[in-house]
Image (cartoon, grey):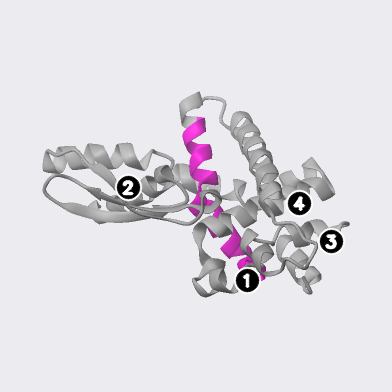
Amino acid sequence: MENHKEVEEKLGVVFSDKTLLEKSFIHRSYINENRDRDVENNERLEFLGDAVLELIVSDHLYQEFPDRSEGELTAIRSAAVRTESLAEQSRDLGIGMYLLMSRGEEDSGGKDKDFLLANLFEAVLGAIYLDKGYEEAKTFVSRTVLSKIPVIIKEGSFVDPKTKVQEIIQSKFKETPTYEVIKEIGPDHDKHFTVTLKTASRKFTDGEGPSKQKAEEDAARKALDILK
């Protein structure tokens, strides 16, 4: 990576160990085309960042909303850290352009794929945690993820979209929606699913995601927009 300072300015964090910053931007596919280089992909950092993010968001919600139930807190957290939300954080920060990946992955639009941008956000957070510690990681999450929680609560977007769309479809059309996987691509470690949301008499929309569950949620959210 030749743009350490530029990336650090976007993140609002100056790294002591620049290799951690670099590693957080390396997608697995990049390794496949650069086997002569001694580099590691960002998946371990993503794993760590995911855990750090869940702790920070959970602690914040527990402290800030003492009157909300465990179920509500879980739903709000899920909305704040879902793939689409984290991808939007990476876009807001403007860091997707620095992702290192294979030429094929990049040509297929990899630098703007939701699941890759979400993974990037978590990997960067993992790197911040290792390099600067918990408090700096918490400050970073406060500026990004936590700042969006008031909007999530105001709009009610934390309500499970699958439950909500089922209630509307059953009320409006007297039918029960189902989800069908119509496409599954990628290796086991990097799957991508496309599902369609339909009833016995009509098809509503398709959804995509790195898991069947995420793809179904994406389809449900899109269907809600159509129904509204």
> Which secondary structure, mark 3?
helix
Q: Which residue in the protein does label 4 denote?
A: 127
Decide: few, some or many residues near mark 3? Use Cα within 10 Å; few <14, some 14-19, many ≥20: some
Q: Which residue in the protein does label 2 denote?
A: 220
Q: Which residue in the protein does label 3 denote?
A: 18
> Which secondary structure, mark 1?
helix
Q: Look at the numbered discs 1 and 3 and tell me whether their residues touch, using CB distance below 8 Å.
A: no
Q: Residue at x 51, y 63 (%)?
A: 113
In the rendered structure, does residue 74 fall within the stretch colored magenta? yes
Cα–Cα gap, marks 4 and 3: 10 Å
At label 1, the amino acid type is Met
Q: Look at the numbered discs 2 and 1 and tell me whether their residues touch, using CB distance below 8 Å.
A: no
Cα–Cα gap, marks 1 and 3: 18 Å
Res. 181 in view:
yes
At label 3, the amino acid type is Lys
At label 4, the amino acid type is Ala
Cα–Cα gap, marks 4 and 1: 18 Å
Cα–Cα gap, marks 4 and 2: 33 Å
